[in-house]
Amino acid sequence: MGIEAGELLYTRRIQDLLTVGGRVFHQTHWAPLMQLQGTVAEVQLDLKTAQGTVLPMLVNASRIEFQQTQYDQLALIQAADRKSYERELLKARRSVEDSLLSLHETQQQLRQANEFLSVAIRSARMGVWSQDLASGQVKWSTELQMLTGITDTSRWSSSDAFLELIHPDDRHAFITELALAIKHEADYDIEFRLQHSDGSWLDMEGRGHGSYAESGEAVSIFGIFTDISGRKAAERELFELNQKLREADKRKDQFLATLGHELRNPLAPIQNVLEIIRTKDPQEQWMRWSKEVIERHVSQMTHLVEDLMEASRISQGRLSLRKKKVDVADIMQSAVEASHGIIEENKHHITVSQPETPVLLHADPTRLIQVLSNLLTNAAKYTPVGGKISLQAQVSGMEIRFTITDTGIGIPEDQLSHIFGMFSQLEPAIERAQGGLGIGLALAAKLVEMHGGSISAHSEGIGKGSTFTVTMPLAEDQSGAVTVTPREPETVTPKLRILVIDDNVDAAESLAMLFDLNGHTTRFAHDGASGVKSAASFNPDVVLSDIGLPDISGYEVAKALRDMPNGHAMLLVATTGWGQEKDKVLAKQAGFDKHFTKPLDFQALKRFLHQHYTKASNRPVPQDN
Amino acid sequence: MDVRLRNNVNIIGDGQTVMVMAHGFGCDQNMWRFLTPSFTRDYKLVLFDLVGSGKSDLTAYDYKKYSHLQGYADDLIEIIDDATDKPVIFVGHSVSTMIGLLACNTAPEKFSRQIMVAPSPCYINDGDYHGGFSEEDIAELCETIEGNYLGWSSAMAPNIMGAPDQPELSEELTNSFCRTNPDIARHFADVTFTSDHRDELDKCQVPSLILQCDDDFIAPTTVGEFMKNTMPDATLSIINNVGHCPHMSSPDQCAVAMKRFLEYQ
């Protein structure tokens, strides 16, 4: 306090040492307390020091009486420390209360979050499981119990019981997968069947991983099981539907192939007969007209059937390219020739602009001609009579661009994107006069694609004409083209003895007649056995045999012929409707020298025979009859 | 709300006339124990604790209601109504003298006499008026009241002493006569010492006795003079006493002065 005792004794009252607040407190609290209970304990008052500073004190006082005089004894303790301790204590208490409150709130939030999670897990048809690896004890969440309907803990709590609930066929994989996940500290993802309380099996998906002690030892494994029964059922249904669809698609392709084949067979004798008529130029006007009508329509029909065959070859993946180096000019010329008929018929005016110098492509000439002629035919079909069609080719870098432009009906914008689809035609077809199967453009697109090129269509709209553009890569080496259409030299083929074996009587007889007219000697047979028999007596130079015969196959016929004394000298030609690579291989193995696809192109056949027999070594042995 | 429970009302004495005694700031009705023996023969004494003090119902302490002394005055009128339907003699100490004054002005018919022990209508100096304190003094006082553990000790002292299961140990330390909740004590001190009821003095028609100590630090004699001069019907009687509680330290002098006032009037 800095005050000498002498300064206080008998001169100052205790309250004189107090601050104003302390003095009021002394009056209102201390003095009454002293009078009422004789003591005052632990009262905190500020005392003024001699320097005028304030010193917090704890005051204890008691009143005693000594020789009829009352004395108040005061004990003063400096309170700073104690006060601060008490403040700390109070603060600590408040902080504990606060953290208890916040703990309570956190727990509340956690409970709520858990409830939300549980709802989410339930609605996703999920459940949580875990297994303690030391004890083998398995735990299931409430959601998993609800999912399986199994609530009796003993059904899953032991490892063995739990595995009992997994389908026997899936159990081994389940155990193996989990063991692997634990071993490699990896996630597992497994599908299995889990038993429901009603005995049915739930398709489940299990995902999760192990948890490990600090030492690295696995202590437990846990995961989430998801009921995927719904998904599995949908997958199965989808798979079955897909299977059916694929089956139906395959049958459709087979049907189209069969249809093409069956349509082509009757075309063969008709074409042969036309060839026969051609050699005997009819004198009568009406007969000439009739011949021309038949020729035109047979050509149209042949074209349609060929498209159909091509389409089915593409959809069955049987189309293969025979690429060689070809000159663009040759291709263009052939394409224009191929579509000449329809262009002529519609009185269109066609302009062709070819590159000035030879440009070589590495392509299948037949297919490329087909592409361009299809586009030209298409242009002719969809352009009103007397229109203009142009075919241009332009080289740009290592590409060539063919442009086919017409002044036709055009293509609505909304149909531009799907005109290259199979069996698609402009709908509603504005002008269906020319008909068609809707195959031509699809075929062209597919063939261009197989050549590594691209095709696109452009039109300003209805009535404004169309432009088709085909872009193809150039051959890297621009030398050494193969001529596509060699000019046929005048043929002087030796007179041959030809045997035709075909169960299609009209086809066989008309072909035989054609050869007869060309100065050859012919025989024909309608089944394998009589064919072989006929060959033995007739001793032919050439045998044309169908493969699909009613009794024995054409392959067997070939073997029988080769076994004859003169068999090796015969030229054996197979004729089939299918034209598959496989057939050709089989024909070769059976002993055929050559394979022709029906309907037979008589000119091609003639050419082949000419080439074969103009080589000296192949001259036929003169026969006596 | 039962008034008697709320205010811990105690009625003693054999007389017919009702004398209501209200304790001052700091302690509770126990403060009257040295004075009451002089009146129990002739009067019926109604003793009570102000809400927030002593053994009143602390849950009834409404900070809004008791932010003005009128709240306590309304309680007082309810206590009187509960005790009698006749006018009463009211004896108030310290802050309760102003509570009594407000009650007299609110319901003068319920009061026959008013005895004011160590009153002050305003503790803060204001111009010519000398209340005894500056505003800073009052602020410091409120700190002291809050800083003392008389109040919350009932809850905290056992914990601080490390013997929560032996509450009797702390009883001595809790200064039980003057304990209350520290928040209430602080609020009550604030309301009491910042109040100014000088304007109420001249409205009081009830005959009043002012018992003034000649050496009271809290209510100086100038305050007694001011009141006597302001009130329409007031008698000033000076008690030779040091301190603010003459009814405790000089009960006989107080009793003589009171009886003279009651008989004379």
Image (cartoon, rainbow, N blue to C red):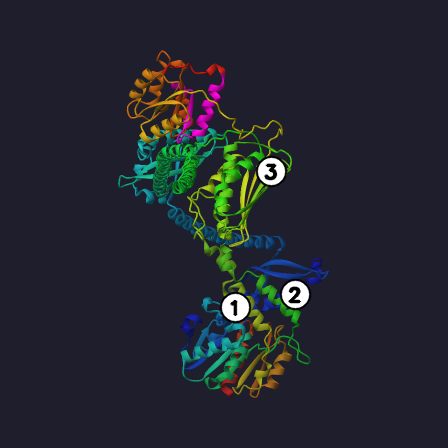
> In the image, which disc is placed on residue A69?
none
Residue position for label 1: B27
Picture layout, residue A408 above or below residue B175: above
User: Where's residue B48, x and y in %?
Assistant: 46, 73
Residue position for label 2: A19
Q: Is residue A260 left or right of residue A446?
A: left
Badge 2 sits on which subunit? A
Is residue A24 inside the magenta stretch? no
Is residue A609 inside the magenta stretch? yes
Badge 3 sits on which subunit? A
Picture layout, residue A362 above or below residue B212: above
From the image, which quarter does the C terminus of chain A lie in?
Answer: top left
**Observer-nearest of A360 and A535:** A535
Identify the element where label 3 is drawn: strand
The amino acid type found where label 1 is placed reads Cys
Q: CA distance from mark 3 to mark 2?
A: 111 Å
* Mark 3 on the same chain as mark 1: no
The amino acid type found where label 3 is placed reads Ile
**Observer-nearest of B145 and A401:** A401
**Observer-nearest of A236 and B158:** A236
The local crowd at label 3, few if under 14, some if 14 to 19, many if 20 or more residues have their Cα within 10 Å, is many
User: Where's residue B2, x and y in %?
Assistant: 40, 72
Badge 1 sits on which subunit? B
| Comparing labels 3 and 2, the label whose residue is closer to the camera | 3
